[in-house]
Every structure is written in C-alpha cells, then in structure tokens.
Image: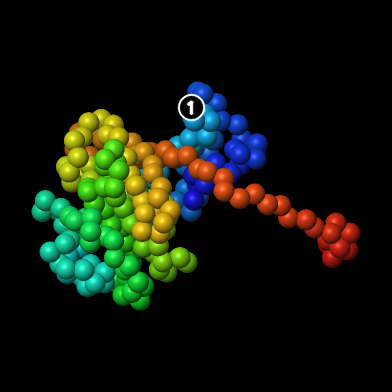
Amino acid sequence: MAIAAFASMADRGFYHATAGGTRLTVETGAGLLPVTLTAAPSGRTAVTVGLPSPRFGEPITATEVATALDIPVAAVGIDGHGPARVSCGFDQIVVPIGDRDVMRGSFRDAVAIGALTDQRGVGGITLVCTETVAPEADMHCRFFHPRVGADEDVASGTSLGAAAAWLVGSGLVPTCDVTKIISEQGHSLGRPTRAELAVRCSGDMVTGVELTACGVVVMRGSFHFNRQAVEARG
C-alpha cells in the first residue's frame, strides 16, 4: 500500500515531510498519482494520495452478493441503496451493510467470493457500514480480494476511496464541494486502521478522492550481501 511504503521511506530518511507538505509523484498500475508528505503534530508523517477518479458502474443484485458472503439478503443495502460496481483505481463491488453485527462474520468462503469477483470481472468486494466502532468515524469497511493474495486487507486505499465515493454519490452523507469522511477498517483482523478521505464533487458528480493516513513502523531490518560473490556472478 502506498501509505505504508511512503511512511517507511520517510522513516528511513529517503523523503522528508514538511509542515507545508512535500509533493511527490508515484507510478502505479492505475497511472501516476500525486502524493504529499506532511509533518503531523504527532511527529508522524501524514501521507496523502490522490486516487484515480471514481467511476460508477452497474448495480449488483443483493441476492448474488448475499449468497457469496453467506449473509441474509435483507442485510444488504442502506436506505434503499444496494450494491454497485465502483472503481477508484480498479473495479470492485461496494456492498452496503445496514447492521455492523453482520460484518463481524468470518467470511471464510473465499471460493464463493472469488467466484463472484470472477463472474463480475472485479478485483474485490468492499463492505461498508455507517454504524462504526469509533463515534468519530463515518464508515466501517472490510475488503475481500481472494484472487490477489491474502483474502482480506487490513487497509486498502482504493477500497476505501470507492466506498467513500459511493457514500457521497448515494447521498448517504451530507455533501459539499469537499466532503471529509473518516474510515475505519481492520478490526476483524485485530489490526484496526483509520484514514481520512476527501471526496470532491462538482454539483451532483463525484470528481475525485484523496486519502490521508499515517503509517507506523513496527519492524526494521536490513539485507547483507557478499559483495565478492555478487561481483563474481555478475
């Protein structure tokens, strides 16, 4: 994840965060993205990434999502708004869940979840609920992507960006030119994370999303090579 990578590089001194923000560009599979490193009051580095412009696709039936997740169909949807294809870097299914208790399940049927992502041609499934653990948070998320390695992510910027864009686009949060949304994720994995998203709108259209979060270095290490052996093979 870009947040962790830049937080680590700032910790090692490759880049220096400033109070006014150090501006960089990162090359990703979704294109060139702007990055800003800001020295936070806590002493950490706040990393802001401008995500690819959101794209909204077709609605997805609650039945096929509920079947893949093994949850009641009635649990899928918030205030009449159902699942839909959304992209904020890659296509995924954003699934609104009205009751956070439903999101506490294990969701271990990676085969069924993977079959749905294959059928719909998306990279993963993002569950989003407006009932949160922390009172200051606006959305609680989980992201599943069984075809790309680990079945569930602790924190995924593109997933959170799509969920925030969906919330604003659906009118489920008060909107303005720039709507700030606090997300929480990773609780079910025992590694809670938090991020702030700024969703930009032009009229009724969502035009952009920026994600800001701080990384925490929990381990440091180094590689040691035998220079003579490397030169001999070279």
The residue positioned 17% from the left and 61% from the top of the image is 76
Q: Which of the 4 quarters of the picture holds residue 217?
A: top right
Q: What residue type is labelled 1?
A: Pro
- Does the image show residue 183? yes
- Name the quarter where the C terminus is drawn: bottom right
How many marks the image carries: the answer is 1
Q: Is residue 13 above or below residue 228?
A: above
Left/right placement of residue 83 relative to residue 48 reads left
Q: Which of the 4 quarters of the picture holds residue 49?
A: top left
Residue indicated by mark 1 = 41
The foreground one among 51 and 153 is 153
Q: Is mark 1 on a helix, strand or loop?
A: loop
Left/right placement of residue 137 relative to residue 79 reads right
How far across and how far down the image is residue 194, in percent?
A: 39, 44
Identity of the residue furthest to the left in this view = 80
Q: In this view, does 15 lie above or below 228?
A: above
The residue positioned 36% from the left and 63% from the top of the image is 144
How far across and how far down the image is residue 149, in percent?
A: 47, 66
Identity of the residue furthest to the top in this view = 20
The residue positioned 40% from the left and 62% from the top of the image is 152
How far across and how far down the image is residue 8, in percent?
A: 58, 44
Left/right placement of residue 182 relative to residue 204 reads right
